[in-house]
Amino acid sequence: GAVVSQHPSWVICKSGTSVKIECRSLDFQATTMFWYRQFPKQSLMLMATSNEGSKATYEQGVEKDKFLINHASLTLSTLTVTSAHPEDSSFYICSARVWSLAVADEQFFGPGTRLTVL
Amino acid sequence: AQSVAQPEDQVNVAEGNPLTVKCTYSVSGNPYLFWYVQYPNRGLQFLLKYITGDNLVKGSYGFEAEFNKSQTSFHLKKPSALVSDSALYFCAVRDNRGNTPLVFGKGTRLSVIA
């Protein structure tokens, strides 16, 4: 199946700094990428949807100025957590999909990035 | 709006016994339904999906799920549980109309006891 990678797999940063997480589709071109956030022992909450070459669509309650998403190419999307605070500590998971009207493609998930803000 | 309910936070089953993890859904159009499994500090692994066709879907590792339109359910089942099946299971749904994202249930922790 299709492979999605994330980098880094884990990161520890100081409060107030910014952290960038990369999501890459390794063997397919993803027209759409999704970013999810997962708190311990909880479900995946959709943060935003990004289509290549256009601005991301954020879910209600997600601060677009804090969680910057860039989808510059069909194989790369980045999530930047700006001015991180301890409450931003979480497991961030990206997902990629090739979408067409003819095919109900599943979303392929990255392995996740564990962010800890001190 | 789409939503998924997994009514059980935890399911305990003895090794060798059949297991069921429950899922009900709500979508505006026709549903695309998925099950994923997550091991600690890992991403999601795809188990199976229902798009159309036979209501009984067979997936990875011996798992299967049955789509029931009248009950809006998509319960995950396995005839004989293994200790290695212990993990967190997520049901997900999306509307078949357009490029909509998957919406996840809260997850059910399965514990298989030897």
Image (cartoon, rainbow, N blue to C red):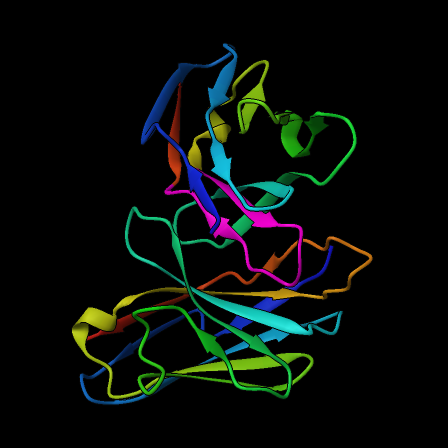
- Residue B47 sits in which quadrant? top right
Question: How many numbered circles are shown?
Answer: 0
In what quadrant of the picture does the C terminus of chain B appear? top left
Query: Magenta segment: does it hold B4?
Result: no
User: What residue is rendered at 31% in x and 79% in y?
Assistant: A63
Q: Can residue B114 be seen in this view?
A: no
Q: Which residue is drawn at 46% across and 14% down?
A: B15
Give the x, y percent position of residue A55.
53, 86
Q: As displayed, is residue A85 above or below residue B92?
A: below
Q: Residue B55, image x and y in percent?
A: 71, 25
Furthest residue in direction front, as rendered: B28
Which picture quadrant has residue B48? top right
Residue B73 drawn at (x, y percent):
53, 27
Q: Is residue B74 left or right of residue B10?
A: right
Residue B56 appears in the picture as rendered: yes
- A11 vs B106, nearest the viewer: B106
Residue found at the far right of this picture: A102
Instruction: Identify which residue is drawn at 56% across, 21% down.
Output: B77
Left or right: A24 with respect to A43? right
Q: What stretch is highlighted in magenta?
A: B89-106
Magenta segment: does it hold B94? yes
Is B57 placed left or right of A113 in the picture?
right
